[in-house]
Amino acid sequence: MRRLVSLTAATVAAGLTLTACGFGGDDGGSGGSAEEGGSTTLDLLVPQYSDGTTALWEEIIASFEEANPDVTVNLEVQSWDNINDVIRTKVQAGEAPDILNIDAFSGFAKDDLLYPADEVVSEDTFADFQESFIENASLDGTVYGLPMIASARALFYNEDLLTQAGVTEPPATWDDLLAAATAVAGLGTGVYGYGMPLGSEEAQAETSIWTFGGGGSWTDGETITVDTPENLAAVEFMKQMIDAGATQPDPGATDRTPMLDVFIQGQIAMAVGLPPTIGQIEERNPDLNYGIAPVPTQDGSPVTLGVADHLMAFRNDDDKQDAIRAFLDHFFSTDVYLSFVDTEGFLPTTKSGAEGTANAERFADFLALLPDAQFYPSTNEAWAATQGALQSLVGQIQTQDAASVLQQIQASADNA
Amino acid sequence: MTTDTPTRPDGRVTRRPRGGPARPRRGWSRWAATARALPWLTPTLVLIAGVVFFPAGYMAWTSVRDLSQFGVDNGPAGFDNYARLLEFTALPRVLTNTIVWVIGVVVVTVLISLALAQFLDKAFPGRRFVRLAIIVPWAASVVMTTTVVYYGLDPFYGIINAFLVDIGLLDQPYGFTRNAVPAFLTAMGVAVFVSLPFTTYTLLAGLQTIPDDVREAAAMDGAGPWATYRRIILPLLRPALAVATIINIINVFNSLPILQVITGSIPGYNADTTTTLIFKFIRADRQIDTAAALSIVNFLIVLAVILVYLKVVKPMRED
């Protein structure tokens, strides 16, 4: 008994000492900085684009801190799987980061948490963004997001498999695609015609490629419109592809990344890919004989899905605004910006970046598609829930009626 | 402190002399003892309040608020979140799945564990290694175990699928993890697998508390092995069985990772339990408030299940 008591007392005493240390250290720290004349700490939350993302940011932060010794930047890197949960928890707890890199900004803008973009970058930086991206980054006429990187989709096709199936050129229309994919499936060698990933990973992207390609849209400008005749026609054609056996089995639960691996292994003849897919092929199966073509659409007119991720600044403490502006201007300075975009293998969103990118030739197919890019209606605050509903529900077209699936998704959008 | 402790049990058992005054004094001394114990209980109480009561209370509070998809509180919502939950059309299917999931996994786990524990209770050469082997699924991360199975069953490059095709059981790879029912059954199998070590060891510990003379006496009275097991061993195993079952019910009911890995990519709600549905409400539908309401319902369900279990099975009864 006595031993227990003294043990408890010792533990409590140790606990108190540790706590005291904690407070003491804190006090000393803030006192010191006040003497130095106000050092600022910026919290930066970013998603992980690749294995090199953290190192890339650390490099950018180091060069920034060298030029701005009174500003410290705290980097937090989260996976794409988690970052939405993390940011939601932080906002709920009143601990929003000062700068966030994520896809959609409109929810934060609607909750009045963000600085307008022109208040956190210099005029020169602001004027350097390409107009199409600025438009996609504004809400009710105010620009809140800083377009950071862009990506577009194109059709990757396996030339050997198409040749074996007697297809001489990549399909440009839906009917061509169905015919080519059916021909490949008919080879009977265990290869699949078209990779259609409708699993929860990125079903909204695959679906958008089809609906945009059929002249559809997810918004009428005001509300989210899922259940429209154009979208229904597109989704019904997707179902027709599945029913005809022109896709890989069970597209409803196939995620994009593993599906693209199967394409890279040469077991799928055609699949929609992104700029980084080129690098993945070089790394995993450099012998793959493939080509890149525009995404097939209903009538062959060029449309593709564009995606832009944004940087945004949270209005936490107006004392930090100058430090935020300094950091963002540093990030968008041509050399720093191109080092990020080129290393990560994305398309630049600035005019100077488009001229300077080292990947101009490599991404020529994608850069040519950018003018025809359509974006997700991510400025509509119901879009996030719609995207979630697309991810978790659209794959049901494998077993259910296309119209009823679209109605379910529309209901989720209306509920948001 | 040591001088006080005996008075409490004493006061309760011994017949006190006639007359009232003893009662208030005894009550007072009990309070005094509690008060003196308080400083030593405080850290535990603070911990329990901090990690159990505060989060639970906050969840209940969240469930009656209207939260924006980014967590901004837009004021009280009454019972709107619960109403939205009741209108959710897939709810019956999800509740059915939850019942199948919990009962199926727990019953199969307990049955297999009873057999395994009996087996491990016998002395045989190499028993130590077999006992060790049964702990392995426990030591491995659940997500890792599940991911191994998930990849093994992948229709494109899974070795289990390839094996089944090679030995001629399947004509072509089958999407075990791509369709709701087979994926759900696969997940149940994994859940049983990872629940076995704990359950087996709890039951084994129970078996080892049963003295040999009880079995000898049964044998002496002419009971066969099966009768001994049913009439003697199982009743004596009841407390261990109760612990194993209740902890498994709670664990299995709240289990997210197995279903998340195996059925996470499956469209629709046919392979969801209430626990994974909470997750979908948060991540896909961005409805933190509805998710909180479902969490409360989830909590009530698991409470009801355990009360029914205690009431019907009376596992703690000593007879």
Image (cartoon, rainbow, N blue to C red):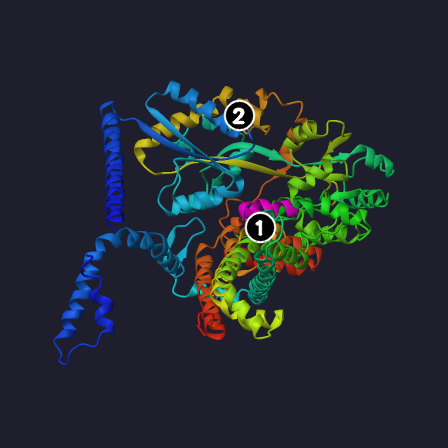
Indicate whether residue B143 is drawn in magenta: yes
- Position of residue A129 relative to residue A89, above or below, is above
Q: Quadrant of residue B49?
A: bottom left
Q: Residues within 10 Å of mark 1 (few under 14, many from 20)?
A: some
Residues at marks 1 and 2 touching, judged by CB atoms closer than 8 Å: no
User: What's the mark number on residue B131?
Assistant: 1
For the residue labelled by badge 2, is the local secondary structure a helix, a strand or a loop? helix
Q: Residue at coordinates 31% horizontally, 36% vertically from top-left? A: A317
- Residue A342 image position (x, y, % from top left): 58, 24
User: Which is more toward the observer, A21 or B178?
Assistant: A21
> Chain for mark 2?
A
Asked if one can make out residue A248 in the rendered structure from this viewpoint, the answer is no
Q: Which residues are magenta?
A: B136-150
Discs 1 and 2 lie in a common subunit: no
Residue A156: % across, % down: 72, 35
Residue under label 2: A340
The image shows residue A204 at horizontal and vertical percentages of 61, 47
Q: Kindly identify the residue that appears in the image at 34 percent across and 30 percent down.
A: A41
Q: Is residue A45 left or right of A358 when viewed as pictured?
A: left
Q: How would you rate the neighbour count of disc 2 (Cα within 10 Å): few for under 14, some for 14-19, many for 20 or more?
A: many
